[in-house]
Amino acid sequence: MITIEKNPETKSAISAIMQSMFDQRNYLADILEYLEKPLTPGMERQVEGILKKYGMHGGSLALDERILTDNPYFRNISFDKVDFPTVKYSKDVIPKRTLMNTDFNRQLGKYLFHYHPVGYFNIDLAMPSLKEGNITWMSPAPSEIISMAEGIEKGSGKCLTMGLGIGFLPYMWLLKDSVESVTVIEHNKDVIDLFNKVIRPQFNTVKNLEIIHGDAYEYFNEEYLRGFDYAYIDFWESNEDGLDDYIRLMEKKVDLPHVDYWIEGSILSLVKQIVALYLITLYQGRSITDFITSLDDDNRRLARKANKFFKRRTDVISTEEELLHLIHDRNVLRDMLSVPVSM
Ligand SMILES: C[S@@+](CC[C@H](N)C(=O)[O-])C[C@H]1O[C@@H](n2cnc3c(N)ncnc32)[C@H](O)[C@@H]1O
């Protein structure tokens, strides 16, 4: 079993980690009542006060609408309301001054505090989207454009993605000279048919775009993935469903450097909370069994993975850096999630 030495450095690190988790919880409670609402000038000052209180930037909350209006997909691809049996395209207006998340969870500082950046536009914006029941699979919103920027940037040669959505990523890749072809795995035939009918004809490219109707899990194996220069896995809606899918993928133990996962850092922020609580329990000498049983099903699965993983290790943690490495390092977390546990 891993051991955390009790010394002044680990003591102060544990207390800073706990404080950052309290701060994050309080921040979320404070900001929640302003989200998705049009801000009055008074509310705006209150939001700015909240951001300042938790150590976030002092810049303006007003976003430059060019992040959308200069984006090639937003500019060139249009679709109005279309209904298919299981999915539909629709257009919702985001009223001006509505406070929204502009990215997924980001880490602030070196401990556990994570936050969604927020902002608003000064104009009403019509935002197209792909919906399946209550799920909004995709829209070219700031949070999507910002969170996919790295995947768009890294695409070159033969590219693969899992999850078609509205074809935003394929479109952005196909615009790049360095991208030769794009392959997409999509499990919903209606998503493909709708895309082929409405959006694909607007793609002005001679490059090969192949859409395969199939399940991502069937194609997620080393042999198939090695056939591409770059792969970006994106078949979840957001953090919570993403965590479930991400864990299933990690359990397949595919470890290839050219494969990335949409909002991986944000998904892992949920895992880090449980790893930190596990290590705090260990440090304080409290019962791991009681800790695990106190959690809900999803978190219990994470804690059981952490327990199995840390039980196999024999290292002694004596510094803050070593402790934070266990919590934040992507490879440590990926390894931990790959450990099988029965449900
Ligand atoms: C977030 S959207 C993808 C957005 C896309 N990257 C874009 O740029 O427009 C997720 C897509 O994954 C699809 N999907 C969900 N589960 C899947 C699975 N197991 N296999 C393949 N596709 C899946 C959904 O139908 C949806 O079209």
Image: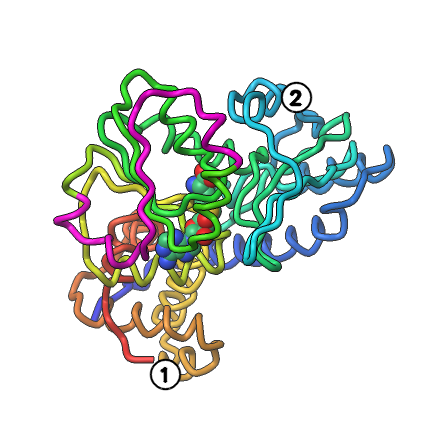
Residue 168: x %, y % from top left: 47, 34
Q: Residues within 10 Å of mark 1 (few under 14, many from 20)?
A: few
Position of the N terminus by quadrant: bottom left
Nearer to us in this view, 14 or 132: 132
Residue at (34, 71) in percent of width and height: 282
Q: Tag 2: residue type? A: Asp
Residue at (29, 28) in percent of width and height: 208
Residue at (34, 80) in percent of width and height: 343
Q: Reply yes or no: does residue 129 show up in magenta.
A: no
Q: Is residue 111 left or right of residue 134?
A: left
Q: Is mark 2 within 8 Å of ligand 1?
A: no
Nearer to us in this view, 210 or 70: 210
Q: Which residues are magenta?
A: 198-225
Q: Earlier in the sequence, mark 2 or mark 1?
A: 2
Find disc 2 in the rendering and name its residue.
64
Where residue 89 sits, quadrant-wise, is: top right
Q: Is residue 272 left or right of residue 177?
A: right
Front: mark 2 or 1: 2
Q: Is residue 144 left or right of residue 262?
A: right
Residue 268 appears in the picture as rendered: no
Nearer to us in this view, 285 or 27: 27
Find disc 1 in the rendering and name its residue.
289
Label 1: which secondary element = helix
